[in-house]
């Protein structure tokens, strides 16, 4: 019988050679007349171990980490088809501490299944949540989501159940589900791992949302920086459609739903929900005034649920297992789990799904193994480019939306970017303003002009011109941007800047090498 | 990368493939990029005509988004991630190295703000394919392989 071998087809794994490893394994097996069945799964999210190859031996999946093309002949020679000993061998996948110490509510199928194998999906609870939703009825689904306490995972943290109720109650024959897959924050890749590892799970989440609010059409707005994700989603949507899981009268329920996949075009601000809606309408991604909320007047003026990929991906199990189960995890008003993403200067980078309440230190030290460089942590940016830089002294802060707001930071989409003590934080403050200047949609003045002035002021501080006066001026500029910007782009760019002023002011004197 | 010269008939077929829906403008522009490599004035004129929107609107969209280049790219396009996770792993140094290596070559070098490969930083994208853990040496190997494949 052919031995089954899993090699991930996921951007991070492929970026460090997974495709080449898959080809080398297939070629070696063919040349030596060994029967194998090569399966391209999603990633488990332990990116630091990629390419992570698994061999099915009996009822176990034996993992081999950081497999290089050059290792392939030696792995065969070591009998890896029988789980043989080799320096790359990590043991059974379900005994790897990095993975078993997580709480996989949303990402449980990632790595486990072949993402584009409908039977594999169906064998792993696929579309069970949709069927249960039909039994519960629309209001029953919304009540379950409300009970779960699930908040929007894109960063804003708005309660999903309340948003769904608003759209369900809104007048209108046509309503939409708009899935925000414009994962632009540096340090984040959980949407991508979910879409590449469990695309049918996302489709099911959108179906459940559509059923609950009475929407017959869904859009996925995917960033163009994810070409592999685009190929996988395109095939998954076609697969669902060809098998009657999208289209008319799905599964005999009388419910019609279909999904259209749109690509973004390299604009960060299109991750803001109203800019995304503009872009979905084929226009410049310029932020809209709110109100009206998208739940009332969203895409093409119709009531629209705008939810992040992970939010929608979390819904299936809320329906399957009950909102109370989800709400039993986490802390205070931060219920359930978040897929944290360990990134930047970290030894064990990757995705860690844990209940809220875990501390930064547990994530960075216990899961992450400290910095990749082995040097001390200097700063941690949580929540993307608009998130504050958190000094090493605050690593014991629990990950909780409100606890983070209390220290002037934000959880956001759960990205955690670690910097060691060689980083110059004045350059990071400058970058925050520069990034805002590059990505501002231009609609409001504080963001469009303020960011450019911010870069100039920081450059003067770095050059040593009137450093104290410019320090005060920069704070004042931050006030203006925060108070008067239309959206989070200009309104939160001051967060990282202020944190640098507060904790790393001495770095302005030592910053060098800004080249333009 | 192999791109075709702009051809109004091919372009018209692409637009028709999207049922000439004006809300598909961003998607049509992507299809043009895939086929022709860049967005020309001729493309903007044809899009305006066939989607029944003004040239100013099309121009506005083209110029708004980073992806829609209005000049032909070099033979290869390398995007170096310039965002925070990569900065924390020497992205600035990699960018400087890339500029030094590729200055005056037929490779278009561009910054990109996050490839979503932040656990394998620093990252680059070469002709649409993402590479992670890119040291200067690995960068040179990737570029050498590109040149070998010409």
Image: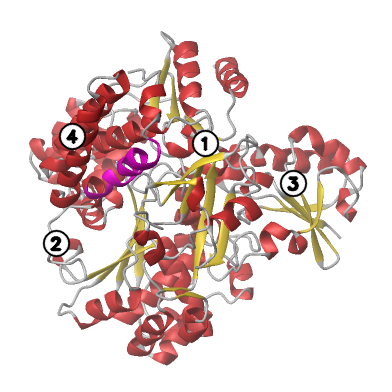
Spatial CA distance of label 3 from label 1 is 20 Å
Which segment is the magenta one? Answer: A491-504
Residue A188 x/y as whole percent? 46, 49
| Crowdedness near tag 4: few (<14), some (14–19) or many (≥20) residues, C-alpha within 10 Å | some
Circles 3 and 2: CB atoms closer than 8 Å:
no
The dot on residue A65 is 3
- Which quadrant of the figure has residue A39? bottom right
Describe the colour scheme in one phrase.
secondary structure
Return the residue at label 4: A473
| Residue A314 sits above or below residue B13 on the image | below
User: In the picture, residue A98 is in which quadrant?
Assistant: bottom right
Q: Position of residue A451 (x, y in %)?
A: 21, 35
Image quarter in which the N terminus of chain A is found: bottom right
Q: Secondary structure at mark 3?
A: loop
Asked if the residue under mark 2 is in contact with the one under mark 1, i.e. CB atoms within 8 Å, the reply is no
- In space, the residues marked 4 and 1 are separated at their CA atoms by 41 Å
Taking the spot 26% from the left edge, 34% from the top edge, the residue there is A438
Asked if marks 3 and 1 fall on the same chain, the answer is: no
Q: Residue at x 31, y 47 (%)?
A: A495
Residue A76 position, x and y percent, is: 88, 43
Q: Same chain for the residues at labels 4 and 1, yes or no?
A: no
């Amino acid at each position: 019988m052919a031995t089954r071998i899993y090699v991930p087809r996921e951007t991070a794994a492929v970026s460090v050679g997974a495709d080449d490893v898959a080809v080398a394994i297939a070629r070696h097996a063919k040349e030596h007349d060994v029967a194998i069945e090569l399966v391209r799964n999603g990633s488990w999210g332990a990116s630091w171990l990629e390419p992570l190859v698994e061999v099915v031996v009996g009822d176990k999946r034996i993992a081999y980490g950081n497999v290089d093309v050059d290792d392939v002949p030696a792995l065969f020679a070591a009998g890896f088809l029988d789980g043989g000993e080799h320096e790359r061998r990590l043991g059974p996948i379900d005994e790897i501490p990095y993975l078993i110490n997580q709480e996989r509510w949303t990402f449980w199928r990632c790595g486990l299944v072949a993402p584009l194998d409908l039977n594999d999906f169906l064998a792993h609870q696929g579309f069970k949540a949709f069927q249960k939703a039909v039994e519960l009825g629309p209001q029953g689904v919304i009540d379950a989501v409300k009970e779960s306490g699930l908040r929007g995972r894109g960063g804003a943290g708005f309660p999903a159940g309340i948003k769904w109720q608003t759209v369900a109650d809104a007048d209108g024959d046509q309503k939409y589900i708009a899935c925000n897959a414009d994962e632009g924050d540096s340090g984040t890749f959980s949407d991508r791992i979910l879409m590449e590892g469990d695309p049918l799970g996302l489709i099911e989440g959108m179906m459940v949302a559509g059923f609950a609010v009475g929407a017959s059409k869904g859009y996925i707005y995917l960033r163009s920086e994810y070409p592999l994700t685009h190929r996988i989603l395109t095939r998954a949507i076609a697969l669902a459609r060809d098998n009657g899981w999208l289209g008319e009268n799905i599964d005999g329920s009388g419910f019609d739903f279909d999904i259209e996949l749109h690509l973004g075009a390299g604009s960060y601000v299109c991750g803001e929900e109203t800019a995304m809606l503009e872009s979905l309408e084929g226009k410049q991604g310029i932020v809209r005034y709110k109100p009206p909320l998208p739940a009332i007047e969203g895409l093409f003026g119709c009531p629209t649920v705008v939810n992040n990929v992970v939010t929608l991906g979390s819904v299936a199990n809320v329906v399957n297992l009950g909102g109370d189960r989800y709400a039993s995890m986490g802390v205070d008003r931060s219920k359930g789990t978040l897929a944290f993403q360990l990134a930047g200067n970290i030894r064990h980078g990757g995705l860690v799904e844990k209940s809220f309440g875990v501390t930064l230190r547990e994530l960075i030290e216990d899961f992450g193994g400290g910095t990749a460089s082995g040097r001390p942590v200097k700063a941690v940016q949580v929540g993307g480019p608009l998130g504050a830089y958190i000094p090493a002294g605050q690593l014991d802060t629990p990950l909780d939306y409100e606890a983070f707001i209390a220290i002037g930071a934000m959880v956001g989409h759960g990205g955690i970017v670690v910097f060691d003590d060689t980083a110059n934080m004045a350059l990071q403050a400058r970058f925050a303003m520069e990034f805002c200047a590059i990505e501002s949609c231009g609609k409001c003045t504080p963001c469009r002009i303020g960011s450019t002035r911010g870069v100039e002021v920081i450059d003067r501080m770095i050059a040593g011109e009137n450093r104290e006066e410019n320090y005060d001026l920069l704070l004042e500029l931050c006030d203006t941007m925060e108070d008067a910007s239309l959206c989070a782009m200009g309104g939160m760019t001051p967060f990282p800047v202020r944190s640098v002023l507060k904790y790393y002011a001495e770095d302005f004197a030592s910053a060098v090498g800004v080249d333009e | 990368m192999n791109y075709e010269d702009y051809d109004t008939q091919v372009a018209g077929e692409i637009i028709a493939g999207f049922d000439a829906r004006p809300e598909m403008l961003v998607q049509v522009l992507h299809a043009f990029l895939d086929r022709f490599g860049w967005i020309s004035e001729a493309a903007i004129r044809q899009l305006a005509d066939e989607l029944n929107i003004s040239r100013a609107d099309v121009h506005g969209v083209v110029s708004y988004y980073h992806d829609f280049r209005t000049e032909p790219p070099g033979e290869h396009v390398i995007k170096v991630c310039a965002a925070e996770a990569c900065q924390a792993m020497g992205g600035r140094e990699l960018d400087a190295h890339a500029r030094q290596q590729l200055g005056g070559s037929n490779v278009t070098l561009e910054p990109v703000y996050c490839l979503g490969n932040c656990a394998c930083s620093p990252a680059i994208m070469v002709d649409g394919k993402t590479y992670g853990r890119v040291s200067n040496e690995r960068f040179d190997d990737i570029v050498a392989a590109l040149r070998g494949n010409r």
